[in-house]
Image (cartoon, coloured by chain):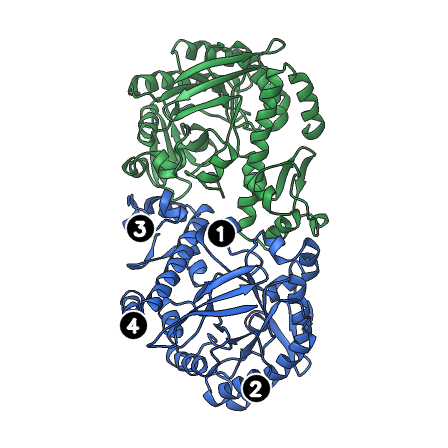
Chain colours: A blue, B green
Amino acid sequence: MEFRILHQSHSSQARICKIRTLHGEFTTPVFIPVGTQGTVKAVCSRDLEELGVEILLVNTYHLYLRPGHSVIKEIGGIHSFMGWNGPVLSDSGGFQIYSLADLAEIGEEGVKFRSHIDGSIHLLTPEKAVEIQEALGADIIMCLDHCIPYTSQYDKVARSVEITTKWALRSIKRKMKNGQALFGIIQGGTFWELRERSITDLLKLDFDGYAIGGLCVGEEDKAREEIVKATALTLPKDRPIYLMGIGRPDEIVDAVSYGVDMFDCVLPTRNARNGTLFTWEGKINIRNARYREDQHPIEEDCSCYTCSRYSRAYLRHLFNTKELLAYRLSTIHNLSFFCRFMQRLREAIKMDKLDQFRNTVLKIFG
Amino acid sequence: MEFRILHQSHSSQARICKIRTLHGEFTTPVFIPVGTQGTVKAVCSRDLEELGVEILLVNTYHLYLRPGHSVIKEIGGIHSFMGWNGPVLSDSGGFQIYSLADLAEIGEEGVKFRSHIDGSIHLLTPEKAVEIQEALGADIIMCLDHCIPYTSQYDKVARSVEITTKWALRSIKRKMKNGQALFGIIQGGTFWELRERSITDLLKLDFDGYAIGGLCVGEEDKAREEIVKATALTLPKDRPIYLMGIGRPDEIVDAVSYGVDMFDCVLPTRNARNGTLFTWEGKINIRNARYREDQHPIEEDCSCYTCSRYSRAYLRHLFNTKELLAYRLSTIHNLSFFCRFMQRLREAIKMDKLDQFRNTVLKIFG
């Protein structure tokens, strides 16, 4: 992986970078759409190409359970499987086991968990997580980390940091030299002292990039923002910083100003399937009766496929009648919004106008 | 509407025709995908354009109930609403009221029915059916017909023919001279004498085309084929003949040999959403475990978007995980198959090799 800083802001830690992977490069700050089970829900890979999406995320946990990493390897890897030739990042499964599976047991060795699909028992170790992600062939892979609820006491969080560090070391030892980039994940909950310890531990291991994990587990916005800020400001500037699971426009802008480069979140795609659409005038619910005869596209100046061909009235009708096309057209638009949002964000950094952009965003989405 | 016979077979009634409408022309024999609620389920209008689909069908019954024909008129008509600029045929609602709604009352005036969506009561008259279809702005519109179950006694069927004829006359009287083509629908169940009477009645009214209706209501294949054959052979050759609701490849070939030009059916699209895919080696169920690691496209020599980018293994995975993309990719392929099927059928007519083609089709799908 090659990491280049193209532009560094004067007034904040915000920056524009290029990251080159085995399957091409992408520009940061970047928003990564989530393709949980090997598909960004409701859209196809050509839709994503047309939107200018540069990198996708897939979930190790889901793909390990179905169809199995060996099947995907057999087909030629995740790129060939999904019909997507650009960069792919696979997460390690730590967060999904925490949030979806029944945790049977957690120890030094790894996590024993019960599949949320068929109840079968599996052991995921840091070595196994690397092995699965090597079989998938993602361009950026993540260490297995140890996620715990935000209500956990200090001692439990300290223990999770300790385990995450040990697992990080084992991940590095297991990993082949095959050009895949490996990122470590900072844990420590909302205890800054523990976050600091996690940073110190993982920096010694010299990862290709650093992710801020263990957030979005119930903590308050304020607490999250403080941890993101302190963590991002402490991490070294010569590697990508990736804030996992965050996607609210206002949170993205703040995190970027602290130096974060990469984001992923189901927000735009999940919202789309509920009929909640992003525009520069705020979020709208397209199922609302006010759009019944609305001939306009979702956004006049959006050039996405949906806006170039369909009216709000048609979208509303598709939701109202539960037609499958509703989900794809809405997802295309929301991803288009996020692409344009990140583009304007990068332009604001380049022009050193991030504060101004932040005010605009807060007015609309804050 | 302009109707031109380009090629008449020597050995059967099969023929190749061009039909020009207000929104461009299409070549027959044609298979018309069904866009019940103003969308061919799971695909978008660009998908249909890319497949070479030339004409779509929409349902008056559904669009009248949701979003309402006045809404569609407000948006600029069905073409603008759906983002589809090619020919559109709208059916009259007769069959949907028969199959979906609770029939409250049927009389000379029209059909009083209870909506399958919210239980509200509506009166559909032949005049109203024309009025709705004029608001939709379809290129070919259908008279309201009177559908009854195949178990009906002779007298009841005779009465339905009588009503259908009266309604056909009222439809013509109500219709504006606006370039929309109007088709009459032959009724008469499986009683040839009544079909003959219906043909004689409707021929006097000089429609732009004639549809064979009232089939697929439970009658046996053999009875249906005999009625289709006798009806198609009796109808005049200077107008299009449209067999409503039929789409099985073997039935299409037979009907074409009797002179039928147009077909519509939910078969390829509904099958697709169940994972049943059409190929020149027969139908396959893509959810089958045998496709788990199958790297091949659904069909090697199919150039549809699905086959050009995705493997059977990926399709199977999408169905297995209930991912929305499954339905679109499968629908694209099945419609591609039907387009190619009709193309080969037209070539067979041109080469006077329909018998040979029929044998091939029977071997695969019979």
Q: Are marks 3 and 4 on the same chain?
A: yes
Q: Chain of mark 1?
A: A
The CA distance from mark 4 to mark 1 is 31 Å
Towards the viewer: B307 or B149: B307
Which amino acid type is shown beneath numbered disc 1?
Glu
Q: Which residue is mark 1?
A: A49
Q: Position of residue B151 (x, y in %)?
A: 55, 25
Q: Position of residue B252 (x, y in %)?
A: 59, 24
**Picture disc at residue B160:** none
Which amino acid type is shown beneath numbered disc 2?
Asp
The CA distance from mark 2 to mark 4 is 33 Å
Towards the viewer: A292 or A233: A233
Residue contact between numbered discs 1 and 2, judged by CB atoms under 8 Å: no
**Picture disc at residue A301:** 3
Q: Position of residue B8 (x, y in %)?
A: 55, 11
As drawn, is A157 to the left or to the right of B356? left
Q: Which one is earlier in the sequence, the residue at label 4 or at label 1? A: 1
Q: Are marks 1 and 2 on the same chain?
A: yes
- Per the image, label 3 sits on a secondary structure element best described as loop
Check disc 1: other Cα within 10 Å, few if <14, some if 14-19, many if 20+.
some
Q: Are marks 3 and 1 on the same chain?
A: yes
Q: Which one is earlier in the sequence, the residue at label 3 or at label 1? A: 1
Residue at 34%, 52% (x, y): give it. A286
Which amino acid type is shown beneath numbered disc 3?
Asp
**Picture disc at residue A201:** 2
Position of the N terminus of chain A, as image quadrant, is bottom right
Towards the viewer: B309 or A149: B309
Q: Which of the two marks, 3 or 4, is nearer to us in this view?
A: 4
- Per the image, label 2 sits on a secondary structure element best described as helix
